[in-house]
Every structure is written in structure tokens, then in C-alpha cells.
Amino acid sequence: MSENLDVLLSIGEISVAFAGFAGIITAISGRDQAVWDPGNTTRFRVMVYGSLSATVMALMPYVFLLNFEQVDWTLSVGVFAVYLLIFSTIMIRGFIRQRKALKSAVSIAISCLLSAATATQILAFVGFLAADLGIYYFGVFCLFIQSTIAFVRLITQAILRQGSSHTG
């Protein structure tokens, strides 16, 4: 194994921690309410799906190492491109459906981030960019950043909503 894949493991571990921590915060902040706010539900989904996606995609090159001596980056990037195309379509559709409950600037930023990651993976798969660890890492990192943004928005909305319910 000539490449240093440890950075992918680190991103995977941090992403799993985000998913777990967001679940705890959401459970604690939403225990007074019978029904979740649609915006927080969408933020939670984006955060958990993004975290789990980053984790799975960070670990995918290791599957190749179980059977081969080196990672086939073209195949890895191709699988990742297809996954990101489906994932980003579902996420952007969710943003459009929940546009009244979400801040549009954040939704647009995450949509652009997902689109950039998807386009980069597709360009690498078809040969316009070199399919390697750096391109693959960019896609995983975009999923991680998307999860981080959703995590911060979820926490701030939970804290703000919690604070406003005690003062009102």
C-alpha cells in the first residue's frame, strides 16, 4: 500500500462521532416537544446521512485492499460519483421541499458543496482529472463539511428554540 489512507480513517471516525453526538443532542433538546420541527428534522437527516455517507465512503478504499494490493482509484471514484449523484439529488430535493423551514443561504451552500463534490468525482472518473486519493478525499471531505454545517445548525437551532421556550 503506497498511499497514506489514514486521513480517510480519521474523517470516518470523526463523522461517526458527529452522528452519535447529534442524536444525543436532538433527543435531549426535543424531549419537551411531541412533534419535531420540520427544519430540525431535515437538519438531523442531512447531518446523519452525511456523516454515515462520509464514514462509508472513507472506508470503501479499504475494501479494495482486502482483494488487491492497491486501490483502484478510478473504480473507487466512479462508485463514489454515482453515490454522490444520487445522494445530492435526494438532499437537494429535501431542501426544496423544506424551503420554508430552512435558511435558504445554508441550503444553497450545502447544495453547491455537494454539487462540487459530485462534479469533481465525475470529472475524475471520465478522465478530465486524475483519479487518486486527493480527488477521492475531496469528496469525502465535502460530505464531512456538509455534516458539520448541518450539525452546527441543528445544535444552534436546538439551543435557540430551547432558550426561547423558557423565556416565552
Image (cartoon, rainbow, N blue to C red):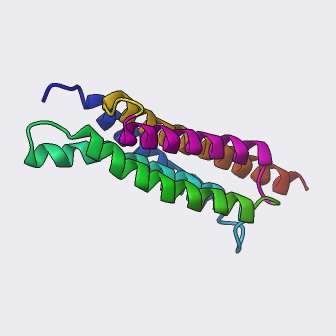
Q: Which residue sits at x=54%, y=37%?
A: 145
Q: Is residue 119 above or below residue 26?
A: above
Q: Is residue 121 magenta?
A: yes
- Residue at 19% across / 49% down in the picture? 63
Image coordinates of residue 22 in percent, x first then y, are 54, 51
Image quadrant in which you'd find residue 46: bottom right
Q: Give the x, y percent position of residue 28.
A: 60, 58
Residue 141 seen by the camera: yes
Q: Is residue 49 left or right of residue 73?
A: right
Give the quarter of the figure containing the C terminus: bottom right
* Secondary structure mostly taken by the magenta-highlighted segment of the chain: helix
At horizontal 84% and vertical 52% (from top left) the residue drawn is: 164
Q: Nearer the viewer, residue 126 or 147?
A: 126
Q: Residue furthest front?
A: 127
**Image quarter (top left, top right, bottom left or bottom right) of the N terminus:** top left
Magenta extent: 101-127
- Say which of 163 and 6 sits in front: 6
Q: Tell me the residue at 49%/59% (across/down).
A: 86
Q: Where 98 falls versus 114 (above or below)?
A: below
In the displayed structure, does residue 52 sit left or right of residue 31? left
